[in-house]
Image: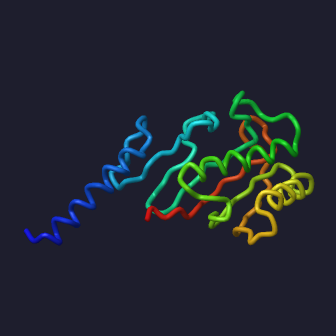
Amino acid sequence: MNRGFLAVLSVVGLLATAATANAQEDFPLSPNGVRTLAPEGAISPTGTWNLGTRAGDFVFVAGMRGIDPATNSLVPDEEGRVRQAFLNMQLIAASEGASLRDAVRIVVYVTDMYRYRPIANQIQAELWGDGPYPPRTIVEVDRLNQDDIFEVEGTFYAPLD
């Protein structure tokens, strides 16, 4: 084998070793390399789902609600709950090196559009500053898990290079 090819194999091996070392030990990689995320300080899932996954250069964060990670219970006030949901999403993204500005899309679910959309807009403006803001879909739903009022999910770009 030529030296260039061996050097490439060596680099690929080092990258694979680094990826394995960074992977959550509790969760094996999928056959195609999708890694399940469960960073320290995050909430505990309330059902049969995971907090997020990394697939290549993208991080997918599950619907996050206003659950306080310290107590794993819902934050009592509406504004605090919406803020905590965004912060929970931010924590998962940050665990993979993405900031809120790296969001390529977010989806917001509310149980009352007129009541909670202004709060979501206010909190998002606080967290993102003057923008630019990611594309966002907001949907009013009849119910959310645990009769919650708000949920946000996001997709983030976080290149591995």
- Residue 46 point in image, percent of width and height: 63, 33
**Above or below — where is 38 with respect to 161?**
above
**What is the basis of the colouring in this image?**
rainbow
Tag count: 0
Instruction: Name the spot of residue 54 as percent of width and height, x first.
Output: 48, 54
Residue found 74% across the figure and 56% down from its top = 108
Q: Position of residue 123 (x, y in %)?
A: 83, 55
- Please report the residue visible at 62 percent of the width from the left and 36 percent of the height from the top: 41
Q: What residue occupies the far top of the structure in this picture?
A: 71
Instruction: State which quadrant residue 128 falls in.
Output: bottom right
3 sits to left or right of 99: left
In this view, the residue farthest toward the right is: 115
Quadrant for the C terminus, please: bottom left
132 to the left or right of 125: left
In the image, residue 106 sits, relative to residue 49, either above or below, namely below
Q: Is residue 113 or residue 106 the one in the foreground?
A: 106
Q: Residue shown at 87%/46% (left/top)?
A: 79
Residue visible at 13% across and 69% down in the picture: 3
List x then y, in percent, for residue 119: 88, 54
Q: Nearer the viewer, residue 17 or 27?
A: 17
The one of 103 and 49 positioned closer to us in this rendering: 103
- Examine the rendered structure and indicate whether residue 148 appears above or below residue 59: above
On the picture, is 87 further left or further right than 157?
Answer: right
Locate the N terminus by quadrant. Answer: bottom left
Which of these two is toward me, 73 or 91?
Answer: 91
